[in-house]
Image (cartoon, rainbow, N blue to C red):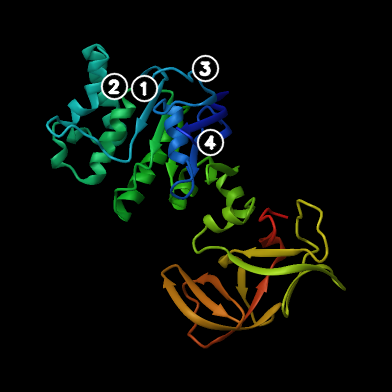
């Protein structure tokens, strides 16, 4: 069952059109992440679903109802903002129950919902404290709890962890994942520019650029089969390596050629018909470059070594371009060392140099 349906929606600020006919369907119980750089329109889309922005054209449906012109409070949604926005003179309990009191919810029901949300978020011991007595992570838990007590069918998160330090972001990310699992069929739409949050939280990721959807898919699909050069470069850390070249027919069949480098493509799963002579960009993840004694690509020299504990990232160059190689933390390398690399055609991505689309 579709929980949220965005149908040919256009959003405009006076003469500036942000979206033009954008569509997106989200199934009940899904955790959807809107991922993209600043200014790509992900928060605008979330605010349109929430009813905080009017749409110029199109419709928004939530749980089978057309809510395009309904007020936010009537849409059956709950929202967690980037800012905690807690009332400083109220206790945690009062902050979480304030909206319910304004809606004239019975006191017994308020106490029941607050207790349940506090238990889920592990903040029961904090209910009588004020916000200034809490850490940043605890304040964000309270902000999430304030949304939880509404018992909504759809939860909207607008970069809720961006104001936290790295350690707290990691902790809260795990808590949000657990929360979604505990709530069962609750639908969540989460906005972030952080690809780690997107990859670890999402059932499906919606990658956006310049107010357009570039690709929708599972984290594995987005990572392993990016639809275009933007998605390939935006998702993944370290970033995917890109090598410019062309397709040529050789004695081994169709191959990728870049100077003296070549890669037979007989096993590559093309999604379009390849054209010999076509200019292309080959993308390969750092972990898919294997350091070996005998490989297709000899003649690389180590420039920089980045030890990262469990992994080591080695930057190497052949004089015409630089590549990142991700290997085990036990691998020893030093600047100046010579490397030979092996590349598997099943692990690369090919893109049109002209359009940037996957081949």
Residue located at (26% from left, 18% from top): 100
> In the figure, is residue 134 to the left or right of 177?
left
Q: Is residue 196 above or below residue 120?
A: below
Secondary element under disc 2, as helix, strand or loop, is helix
Asked whether residue 216 appears in the rendered view, the answer is: yes
Report, in whole angstroms, how far the alpha carbon at label 3 lies from the one at label 2: 28 Å
Q: Which residue is mark 4?
A: 19
Mark 1 or mark 4: name the one nearer the start of the chain: 4
Q: Which residue is mark 3?
A: 66
Mark 3 or mark 4: name the one nearer the start of the chain: 4
Secondary element under disc 3, as helix, strand or loop, is strand
Q: Which mark is residue 113?
A: 2
Mark 4 or mark 2: name the one nearer the start of the chain: 4
Secondary element under disc 4, as helix, strand or loop, is strand
Give coordinates of residue 52: x percent, y percent.
39, 28
Give coordinates of residue 353: x percent, y percent.
69, 61
């Amino acid at each position: 069952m579709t929980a949220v349906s965005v149908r040919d929606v256009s959003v405009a600020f006076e003469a500036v059109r942000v979206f033009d006919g954008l569509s997106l369907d989200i199934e009940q119980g899904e955790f959807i992440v809107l991922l993209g750089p600043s200014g790509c329109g992900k928060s605008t889309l979330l605010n349109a679903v929430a009813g905080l922005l009017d749409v110029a054209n199109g419709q928004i449906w939530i749980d089978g109802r057309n809510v395009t012109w309904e007020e936010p409070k009537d849409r059956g949604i709950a929202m967690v903002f980037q800012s905690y926005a807690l009332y400083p003179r109220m206790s945690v309990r009062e902050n979480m129950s304030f909206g319910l009191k304004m809606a004239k919810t019975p006191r017994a029901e308020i106490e029941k919902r607050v207790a349940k949300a506090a238990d889920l978020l592990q903040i029961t011991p904090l209910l009588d404290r004020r916000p200034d007595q809490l850490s940043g992570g605890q304040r964000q838990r309270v902000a999430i709890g304030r949304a939880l007590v509404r018992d909504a069918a759809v939860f909207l998160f607008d970069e809720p962890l961006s104001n936290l330090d790295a350690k707290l972001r990691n902790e809260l990310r795990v808590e949000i994942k657990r929360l979604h699992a505990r709530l069962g069929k609750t639908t969540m739409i989460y906005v972030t520019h952080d690809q780690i949050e997107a990859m670890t939280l999402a059932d499906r990721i919606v990658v956006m650029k310049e107010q357009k959807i570039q690709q929708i898919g599972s984290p594995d699909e987005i990572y392993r089969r990016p639809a275009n050069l933007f998605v390939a470069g935006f998702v993944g850390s370290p970033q995917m390596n890109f090598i410019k070249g062309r397709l040529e027919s050789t004695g081994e069949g169709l191959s990728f050629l870049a100077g003296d480098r070549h890669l037979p493509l007989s096993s590559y799963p093309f999604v379009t018909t390849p054209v010999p002579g076509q200019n292309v960009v080959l993308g390969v993840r750092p972990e898919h470059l294997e350091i070996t004694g005998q490989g297709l690509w000899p003649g690389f020299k180590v420039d920089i070594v980045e030890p990262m504990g469990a992994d080591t990232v080695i930057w190497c160059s052949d004089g015409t371009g630089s590549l990142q190689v991700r290997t085990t933390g036990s691998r020893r390398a030093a600047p100046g060392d010579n490397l030979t690399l092996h590349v598997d055609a099943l692990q690369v991505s090919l893109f049109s140099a002209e359009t940037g689309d996957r081949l």
